[in-house]
Amino acid sequence: MKIRRYAGVTTFIVAGALALTACSGGSSGSNDEPSDAAGEATTGIVSVNGTEPQNPLTPGMTNEVGGGLAVKNIFSGLVYYDSEGASHNEMAESIESEDNQHWTITIQDGWTFSDGTPVTAESYVKAWKYTALLSNGQNQQYFFHDFAGWSDTEDSEIAVEAVDEHTFTVELIAPSADFQLWLGYSAFMPMPDVFFENPDIYSDAPVGNGPYVVDSWEHENVISLRPNPDYKGPRTPKNGGIDIVIYTDENTAYNDLLSDNLDIITNVPSSAFATFEDDLGDRAINQPAAVVQVVQVPEWREEFQGEAGKLRRQAISQAIDREQVTETVFGGTRTPATDFTSPVIDGYSDDIPGAEVLQFDAEEAKRLWDEAEAMDPLGADYTLEIASNADSDHQTWVDAVCNQVRNALDIGCEFYPYPTFDEFLNARDDASVPGIFRGGWQADWPSMSNFLGPVYGTGAGSNDAQYSNPAFDEKLKEAGQAATPDEATALYKEAQQILFEDLPGIPLWYNNATAGYAETVGNVEFGWDSDPILYEVTKSE
Amino acid sequence: MRWYIGRRLLQVIPVFLGATLLLYALVFLRPGDPVAALGGERGLPEAVQEQIRERYNLDKPFLVQYLLFLKGVFTLDFGVDFRGREIVDVIAGAFPVTIQLAVMALIIEAVFGIGLGLVAGLRKGGIFDGSVLVISLLVIAVPTFVIGFVLQFLLGVKAGLFPVTVGRDPNFESLLLPAIVLAAASFAYVLRLTRTSVAENLSADYVRTARARGLTRSRVTGRHVLRNSLIPVVTFLGGDLGGLMAGAIVTEGIFNINGVGGTLYQAITRGENVTVVSLTTVLVIVYILANLLVDLLYAALDPRIRYA
């Protein structure tokens, strides 16, 4: 099964990202209007490939790609992200705070749900509290973990209170300078009263407040979205509707695209990596995304502890020729990593001090490994295990990396497979993985902190390698309290310097968004999260 | 006859119990924890996982789970899958298109397999027989997914003769190419079975007698040779119906048909015991009924066989 949490990937190219950073990096989080996108309103129904949602289509339950594409089009939150990952107010009038910890949110007047009831501050407060309450069993419960009062061991209410019909307040456990960047994520959408009356029967035709409404959902077949006539926000549909067509095989979807039976494909199958840019020409999309792949180095393995451990981490990192693997194994659909975040994130730079450790240098790698051997010998017959789940295609790149490690360091190296993804998860959780292991991180929202805190913070939810460095934690805390986004970015870079020294994970490459569209549609752009921005797509009938 | 059918139907009960227990045990023994995988890379909070396990009885011992499942079956309440969909709806959604596909494939392989097999058998050793032999070997040797992708690409994408995928509206036209692909392998077996059987029967005593009595060539072939040659073929076709339905996973994937195969595959990878066992139970029943039908057909084909 392919579970990918859907928040996550981008479209604009590295050059664009760099240019953006260069001109002061103030775009993300600003509230100015998005530039006028080209294209007049059309009436054709746009078809896009999808997978059958694994959960009811609600903000609280949907945590994977299949349902995510629908949910982000049938619900509207306080802010939305444009194609460059910048956030703009959607329902929010203002999001303000004196101390980055206590926030006051005012929403616009006049919004309604598709059943006619008004969207009020209470719609947000009730929805957030419902999702965050443990006993409601919501998949997205975790995303409120930075709210005061949140708990994953007992039922407790989070600190979100309505002040009046259009105003509510939020208290976080710690200051977060980028709080408003979170709010476009689907877990933070409002819910109508009809949901709370009977959450169980709500699932098939959800009442939302987004640019589209669900017209019908034929399971395993097609989800039909049609424009919501009552929608008031900036994401006005420029087409006559969206059909999310369910495919079990991406190859099939690709064949349909080639024969104009499908307008947009969100994921080009790996079998077409070599040809899709020729097949589709300028209708092919291949750009870095907000997904970084790393190998985690477990703290529980003795060979990676202490001074010798540090040298070994660096040696392994420098033994890997990322350029070669991304070209030969992935056919150019990955981009070699140069930091712990992603090129599409505001503030990204490829020259953070210490990033040289990601450059391939076999001689230096061998020297570092020998130095470590002199301190704490493992012997020449040491074998490095690289663990991953084997139910999806990981063996190829692991084998390639292993070859490079063997050649450069003169040690053994092999793939350590777990048959299924959940077994791999279990082994990571009980710290029984016998070597370094695959870890991927897909951002929930376009902010640097989201790549660092949840993965490398002490005791954080996805800190599978059990890394802990008080200096790093302190830097993150400082960044959260920063007065401006620029100041925060500078501090996050300093935090990354610490990571480059410790290498709790070794960044490998960024996933690319590989997608495409048919000649039948126009104005197709992909968002920072690698999903197409469907409301802007034009198609004549 | 009625007794015979009744007795055969009663056999369904132990087969049903045995098959479901075995299937349930197999899915139960599947390593890993399906609930842990629901949250993707990040995972779900432990307490949320506990709730899900409780809701789906996954926290209970194997036998209790199985008995709860049986109780559900007998009260016609199969329960819900991980998405909260009634499993009855899942079954009702998946089977119609798969049945349509399987029946079309069965007709294709029967008509072409028996037809060509008969001609080849009658002209044993000729050019026709030789070329049919080569073609059938080729079809058996090439895996279904290769045939599927090649035909889809050549006839669907390039030539535009057939719809590329079935998807939203399954109908005769869109299901034709998938049915041909699905029928391909079995068609070759049917052909070879018929050919051998016909060739063998041609030299049987009763055929020689029939010829000696001056019956027309078509009557000898139709009534005597073919009818007797069909017994092994019908056995094969009966068993194949179930195989076509359950084994269409690959074909269904290639042509995006939302049938039993794909649903079953996804339920297995998700570790949804109840969905897997419910779907396969229906398949087991189809198998049993198809075999019963085959046995009854024997009597119609061969006057020596009578059931009491």
Image: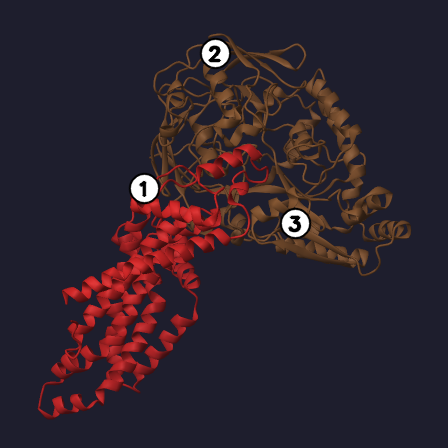
User: Which quarter of the figure has residue A408?
Assistant: bottom right
Amino acid type, label 2: Gln
Check the image and report above or below for A138 versus B271. Answer: above
| Mark 2 belongs to chain | A
**What colour is chain A?**
brown
Looking at the rendered structure, which numbered label has been put on residue B301? none
Tag 2 secondary structure: loop
Q: Residue furthest top?
A: A164
Looking at the rendered structure, which numbered label has been put on residue B77? 1
Check the image and report above or below for A51 versus A226. Answer: below
Q: Residue furthest left?
A: B214
**What colour is chain B?**
red
Q: Which residue is mark 3?
A: A326
Q: Which residue is mark 2?
A: A108
Tag 1 secondary structure: loop
Residue B270 location, x and y as percent? 47, 46
Amino acid type, label 1: Asp
Q: Is residue A259 visible?
A: no
Left or right of B286 on screen, residue B62: right
B276 vs B180, nearest the viewer: B276
Residue A49 location, x and y as percent? 43, 42
